[in-house]
Image (tube, rainbow, N blue to C red):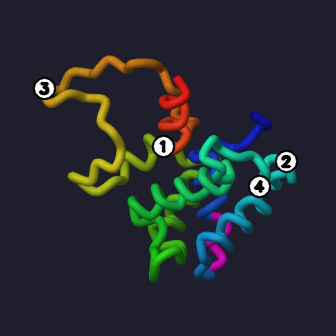
Amino acid sequence: MSGMPTWEEFNVPVLTVLSDGATRTLRELRRDVADAVGLTVEQRAETLASGQLRADNRIGWAASYLNRVDALHRPSRGRYEITDFGREMLRGHPNGITEDDLKAVAKEGDEWWISNTSADGEKRQQLDDVPNVLDPTEQVEQGVAR
């Protein structure tokens, strides 16, 4: 790949773009975040096996995860705005917000990630070490390809 930011690396730019207080459609958010991080024409054209644009997919996952922890608010379908908590996260994590940072602030009982721990508290063995730089769609496509 060509230096495309991971979905985690899009978290701060998503919050930064929305920190102007405007409500944006997902399409506008994707465009503005791509502009803010300086994606090249080639990076913007990268596609997944499904045909979806890789940058759009990763920015969409970042927005989705930030929404799950109430850093973003969706006043209506496909529209996003930053919350006070999102501004707080941005101030507290200006250099990056990881999946672990999001897990740490998730609401109790909201397991939007797949737990690596079994019911008895023991760590499950991973089938392979898929880096979390892949968003869920990319992980599925990689698994299908294998």
Measured Cα–Cα span from mark 4 to mark 3? 43 Å
Q: Classify mark 2: residues with Cα within 10 Å, few (<14), some (14-19) or many (20+).
A: few
Q: Left or right: 35 with respect to 22?
A: right
Q: Residue at x 53, y 54 (%)?
A: 61
Measured Cα–Cα span from mark 2 to mark 4? 14 Å
Q: In x, y percent, where is residue 20?
A: 66, 77
Range drawn in magenta: 16-21
**SS of the residue under disc 3:** loop
Q: Classify mark 1: residues with Cα within 10 Å, few (<14), some (14-19) or many (20+).
A: some
Task: Name the front one of labels 3 and 1.
Answer: 1
Q: Pointer 4: what residue? A: 37
Q: Classify mark 3: residues with Cα within 10 Å, few (<14), some (14-19) or many (20+).
A: few
Q: Pointer 2: what residue? A: 42
**Dots 2, 4 in contact, CB < 8 A:** no
**In the current view of this chain or complex, which residue is farthest to the left?**
120
Q: In x, y percent, where is residue 135?
A: 53, 43
What kind of residue is marked 2? Glu
The quarter holding residue 23 reads bottom right
**SS of the residue under disc 1:** helix
What kind of residue is marked 3? Asp
The disc, 3 or 2, on the residue closer to the chain's N-terminal end is 2
Q: Residue at x 75, y 46 (%)?
A: 46
Task: Name the front one of labels 2 and 4.
Answer: 2
Q: Classify mark 4: residues with Cα within 10 Å, few (<14), some (14-19) or many (20+).
A: some
Q: Pointer 1: what residue? A: 136
Q: Could you tell me which quadrant the N terminus lies in?
A: top right
User: Which mark identifies residue 19?
Assistant: none
